[in-house]
Image: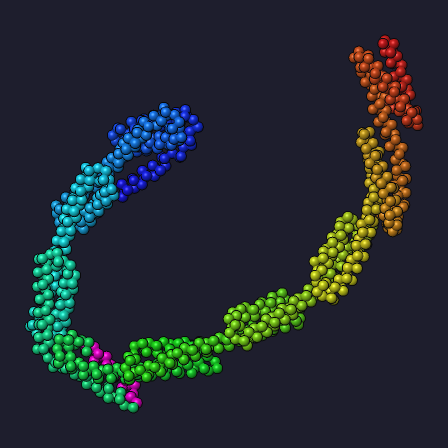
Amino acid sequence: MLVFMGFLAFATLDASAAPPEAAAAKSVAEASKRLESARAALTTAVQRIQKDPPSNADLDAALAAVEALKSALDAGASFETADLDYARAVLAARKELRTQREYVEGRRAKVHIFDSRRRMDEALATLNERMAKFSGKEPGPKEMDDARASVDALKKLADESRPLTKQDEKFAAYISEVDATLARHQKAIDDRWLAQSAQKQRGLLDDSRKALAAAVAELGKAWSDEKFSATDKAITALQKQLDEGKPLEERDRAYRGDADKARAEVTQARRKMEESVAQAGVSRVKAEMGPAQEELATAAKALRARKPTPEQFAEAKTAAFVVRKLVEKYEPQAAASQPIAQYLTEVKNTLTEVEVSLEVRGLDTARADFTQALRNLERRSVTPEQFEEANTAMVILQKTLETAHTKNPAVSPSAAEARQLLKDGKATIERRRYEVDLQQQRAKVDEARKNATALVAGIQKEKPSDAQIQEAEKAIQQIGVVLEAGVAFVKKDRDYALYAKESKERMAELTDRVNRRKIVLAAADARVQLSERLATAKEKLEAAKPATSTDGDIDAASKVVDELMQMFETRAELERQDAGYASYAERARNEMVKLMEALEFARQARALRKITGEALAAASATSESAASAKDLRKKKDLYANAMDKLKACQEEGARMVKENAGLAGIDVLIGGMPTRPQDVMAQCAQKAASLQEPQKKVDVQLRFEDGPRKAYTLAKSLLSKGSKNEALEQYNGCVAEGRILQNQYPDFKDHKFDVSGTSMSVLELIQVCVKERKPLQAAR
């Protein structure tokens, strides 16, 4: 097999090594170049495989080089008749191709033969080693199995290498030697196996012969049933050994002689048994079976009466059992003694009569029990236990019929009636089972319907709890569950199909009642919730109307109104389902619209109070802070903030009142006193007018400090440092800023300001700056 696989491998390599069909050369020069290259490659490849042993890779390369040279010749075939020099080269190349191909193939074959012989030598050495162990002592099963395995392995290698014998005569002679060795070892193994098998079988045969001889000897001393039985068993055992050793008789003459002697001993033992039975006679059998036969005859007579009692049947059954066992006991003696056989035949006749009567009685009893069980099933109310009793009675009748001798003319009528009863009874059980199951199924559906109807009626009275409603819904669903369990009856029973359809309609009706009741209850709950939420909204809205209301009051009222709107949205489906709730919801929605309008007015009123009254109070507090502030810039910011609030009080307040005239009538708390918005806005105007002067004064003061005074102070500092040019610029700035301030605020021309510890007006500071800059101007 390995060599065969090697051939396949090399064939595959050959196929894979073969180059693809070469394209035709375009010129003589190209064809010549390709041819010389292929010849050189082949020469090199052949040189590599000349060493011993060559490698498989070199052999493959040599074969590929041969194919490459052939391809080169095919590619330039068209130029062979066109160019003489090329034709000569091709002629030499073809000769080289033929010679080298034969050499390469020969080397490849020798390598295969070498590998095959090496493997067979190894297998032969293993076989010789195992045969040496096999021949040196009494081999065991393992040694024999190992030797057979080695023979098989070497034979397999020889068969696989046999195709190579045509290529090498020496290898063919070697294969012949291997075949001879295999035949010799195979015969040795077979002979040893035969010797061992014959020896073992001869030992078993001797043991069986000795056992038979001992049994025959005991039987000759005195008769007994046990000795007769032992002799019969010994004959059977010896005959079995003879049958098992039959194949050895043809191959082992000594064993065949022992087997012939054993057969003669078997024949002699049988003759001895017949003689012993004849000597014992039928009297001994009658002595043992006589009492039991008499009891059986009495039982047979009692059974022939018109109405045997149960006790008589029991006695007959016991007597028949005892006689049957005795008959079976003496069957072997009857086979060896005609008188005993005749006596047993007489006993069997009586036994058969009794057994037939008992069988008929058993069939009649089983039929009666089954018939009664079937009658019980025909009653109006049938329990599961009665079905079990009927099935048990049917099984008993079946088993009784199976054990009865139905071909006996005395039994066959009862057997026929039993078969018919079984057939009819099985149909009756199936029919009644179906009828009872159908009846019970209808009862279950009725019960489910009654329960669901009662629960649905219960939730129609007073306000039911969620648990009661859920229980009613589950009860309705239970009708469907019960109907699904009996779906098989719909196809089989038309009345039940109509009943199931009506039950489903009843389910739909009950479901509709529950849904309508849930809608009514939901509508009632919704009315209560709407009423409560409307009352809460009105309460919150009233709290948001007074002048003392806060933003929190407005937010609380807005939240309740939003919840009320959400309630209408979530219960929109309920309005379509319940006309009463829809009417109530419409009225509530109208009230909600009014509440929303009132809420909006309250929200605007609150905004107006914040923009007027609260702004006036805040502006007053801010102006007081500004008056007491030391920092001029902070003072300015506070006055500006107060003025912004007062301006918004006037402008935004007037706009809101203009847009909603109703806001003019609300109260705004000023100092805890209710005041109309117009009056509050007037107070804002008055307060703004009163703050103009101090705000202006702060602005002038800041402009003076940031303008002329700052420039003058910086000029003095620069002049002291000798920076006259920079000082001159600051003096110019002092004069310019002073004149701008004087022009913008003429009312403050005589106002005295603090300048480096000296009190000066704007004009006086300008004059000082003009006076002090003149020297600097003259210097330039």
Q: Quadrant of residue 646?
A: top right
Residue 110 placement (x, y as % from top left): 24, 35
Residue extent of the magenta highlight: 307-326
Residue 45 visible in this rendered orientation of the protein:
no
Q: Quadrant of residue 748?
A: top right
Taking the spot 88% from the left edge, 30% from the top edge, the residue there is: 697
Q: Is residue 308 left or right of residue 378?
A: left
Q: Position of residue 312 (x, y in %)?
A: 27, 86
Choose between 435 and 666: the one closer to the eye. 435
Residue depicted at x 26% and y 87%: 303
Q: Residue 38, percent across and down? A: 36, 28
Horizontally, residue 425 falls left or right of residue 313, namely right
Q: Is residue 162 visible?
A: yes
Query: Compared to 69, does 583 lie above or below?
Result: below
Identify the residue at image location x=22%, y=40%: 165
Percent coordinates x, y for residue 394 in the rendering: 37, 77
